[in-house]
Amino acid sequence: MSRLDEAFTLVSISSVSRDEAALATYVEGLLRRSDTLDVERVGDNVVARTTGHHATRVLVAGHLDTVPGDARQATIVNEELRGVGACDMKGSLAVMLALALDPAPRSLEVTWIFYAREEISRSESGLSEIAVLRPDLLQGDVAVLAEPTGGVVQAGCQGTLKVSVELAGKRAHTARPFTGRNAIHRMAAVITRVSNYEPRTVEIEGVRYTEQLQAVGVEGGVAVNVVPDVATLTINHRVAPDRSRDEAASWLREFLGELVEEGDTFSVRDWAPGAKPSLDNERLGALVRLTGHAADAKVGWTDVATFQELAIPATNFGAGDPLLAHRSDEFVTLEELSRFESVLRQWLA
């Protein structure tokens, strides 16, 4: 069975976030066939470890869940696997399973982590669940997260900040709007400022991160004959890893300036910290060299930040084009899987 066929089997098992049990059971069953792995199930997370006596331990992690989609539509056409999760990231999971089951000796220990609920709120993350219930399973010297990166190292990750801006108005009859103040109309100026944002770019350890700012939600309105007295705008800010939560929120509040007046509210609703590249780590630097390409920045948020919070240097490296992730025509190719497997195998050796 080729890697593409093995990945097809994984894609064919539906594992939308919070519904990973069936796939976790399948992965657990495969890993328990090995006499060289210590396999443990923590909820819908599966961790398999070699248990030799080498001094160095590396972690290789990937998430089991996908965004919503119909797993029955998975198909292989011309050495391309198409289907929900093919690129993000069941193609890479198939390679992880193959290497985990490979009995070839290595000069280091490996922990293979297959975890649930990465695609939803960080508070539900299976990786965080393992960290709370079995932190001993996440001990290691360095980690690779097999997110789709096009076969190059995408270092660190950007933080993500969610803010709500509630604008106040004054109710009135829509026939006599001059007696009130329309909060929705006020929002137009805020949305215009956000849409005119010029992205900030910063270089960290030779890797360039470009921030983003988007209006992602609008709420407001009372009735068709009422001038609304409140309207709420939700803003998402992707933040380079040189800024903390407070620094990012302070910048955004200053950016909106006079448009947020006394009586309005500016509230941070969610924050996930970024992670710096960590390419000064000898093993991660070696991984970059094996790819034959310079490291890029990971512009989205990933659990590289979680590993770095655990004081484990980490980076993103996996098969598939990250621009295809979450799309209805998501796919991964046999060539991409083969290249990922070759580099990862060399790195682990």
Image (cartoon, helix red, strand yellow):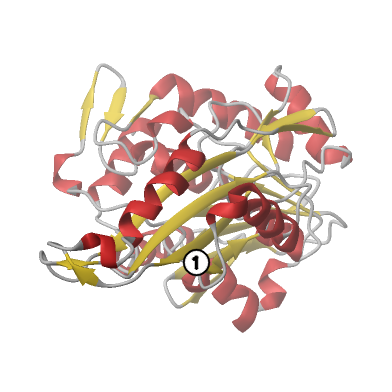
Residue 164, given in percent of the width and then of the height, sits at 48, 64
Q: Residue furthest bottom?
A: 133
At 56% across and 49% down in the image, what residue appears? 237
At 22% across and 61% down in the image, what residue appears? 177
Residue 56, given in percent of the width and then of the height, sits at 84, 54
Left or right for 279, reference 176: right
- The residue wearing badge 1 is 46
At 30% across and 35% down in the image, what residue appears? 5
Q: Nearer the viewer, residue 339 or 239?
A: 239
Residue 300, given in percent of the width and then of the height, sits at 55, 43
Is 102 situated above or below 288?
A: below
Residue 60 seen from this side? no
Callout count? 1
At 52% across and 73% down in the image, what residue appears? 263
Is 42 situated above or below 203?
A: below
Q: Nearer the viewer, residue 63 or 323?
A: 323
Q: Amino acid at mark 1?
A: Val
Residue 113, given in percent of the width and then of the height, sits at 57, 59
Disc 1 crowd, CA 10 A, few/some/many (<14, 14-19, 20+): many
Left or right for 11, reference 325: left
Q: Nearer the viewer, residue 275 or 139?
A: 275
Q: Secondary structure at mark 1?
A: strand
The quarter of the image holding the N terminus is top left
Left or right for 266, reference 93: right
Residue 326 seen from this side? yes
The quarter of the image holding the C terminus is top right
Q: Nearer the viewer, residue 172 or 42?
A: 172
Is 85 situated above or below 77?
A: below
